[in-house]
Image (tube, rainbow, N blue to C red):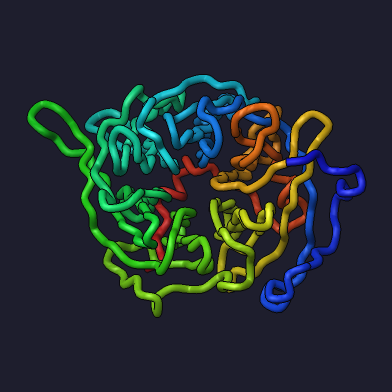
Amino acid sequence: MSFAPLARRAAVSLLLFTDAANAQQRPPVELVHPEPRAETAPVASADDAADDPALWLHPTEPARSLILGTDKKDGLYVYALDGRQLAHVGAGLAPNNVDLRYGFAMGAQVFDLAVCTVRGRERGLAVWLLDAATGLPEPEPRVVHPLFLDDEPYGVALWKRPSDGAFFAFASDKRGRVAQFALRATREASQIAITVEEVRRFEVGSQVEGLVVDDEHGWLFVAEETGGLWRYDAQPFHAATHADRVELLARGAFTPDLEGLALLCDGAGGGYLLVSLQGENRYALFERVAPHRLVREIDPVASRAIDDVEETDGLDATAWPLPPLFPHGIVVVQDGENPGATQNFKLFGWEQFGGSLPFGSAPSPREARWRRALVRC
């Protein structure tokens, strides 16, 4: 990674393609060059280790929101919005990807859930309880459900179905398989436990890591690393063949790999899907709803104090205000190179990525309308 020359720091430029195939299949859109506003403390493990972040939004004090980040050779880290490390849990589980959702009831108590694909001292789907008031995870997951024992689990995404509050997890592997699980709280003797039951499995085609679910619309977005960007129905009873999916980005319209996915939702059903174009060291914004037009690309540059970002795996984002550091929301991306240190995560304001694009007011994921919304089936 190198620090960008001053000439690269133009706020906006026209996207020019050097790859003829990409130029034919991806329309020219505005390209912006944001500088990172902050960065997290580095992970402990050397080489390719940091992988995927997930944002936890505090219910009453936005400044106390947290970033969960995986070290895929070690454990799960917790960071403050200024990048300070606050906690480290699950040492040796080697979590690859992480996602979270709010409001999982266990008897009379309500927790938030963080779920990771792990492939260290245990292999499978690890489910952590988060303190609903602080966001801090328990030292160890409540359950690790065996998964893809004949291969390595990769991506993960959670879905809280608004029609009934049911929780589902999606997990992917190197072969391009995606499995869907129902997560439930069940009473066993005098204890309440979390059960994980597989309810659907389908083949995408080749290796898949980036996954994200649109809770409100009931869509699962899947980044097939070399094969394209797809949308599936998230309902477990729906078919998931190649004929049932919607293509957002075709094979050959990008330089592999496609990696992390994140959704930025407004209060009117619109918003954007953020995608890591790892092979191009940039990001793309697609419209959240069909026809899912590509509307902008983002190529970060170094600031005076913080290096550039390269080869991003996972990312997460929200347009929910998080003052004082991120009054218009935040984008968190994994950085594949961090000169002089191990890998970490870089932090941007959402307005640096999406400024000037149409966007309604951002709803909190804790708002009642999201829990009551009807899912499109």
Residue 182 visible in image: no
Residue 27 visible in image: yes
Q: Residue at x 48, y 28 (%)?
A: 77
Farthest residue, direction front:
47
Q: Quadrant of residue 188?
A: top left
In this rendering, the answer to whether 103 lies above or below 277 is above
Q: Is residue 58 left or right of residue 272?
A: left
Residue 62 image offset from top left, x and y in percent? 59, 29
In this rendering, the answer to whether 258 lies above or below 328 is below
Farthest residue, direction left:
189
Q: Residue at x 30, y 49 (%)?
A: 166
Q: Quadrant of the C terminus?
A: bottom left
Residue 178 image offset from top left, x and y in percent? 35, 59
Residue 242 image offset from top left, x and y in percent? 40, 76
Q: Is residue 228 left or right of residue 26?
A: left
Farthest residue, direction right:
7
Of 46 and 87, which appears nearest the observer?
46
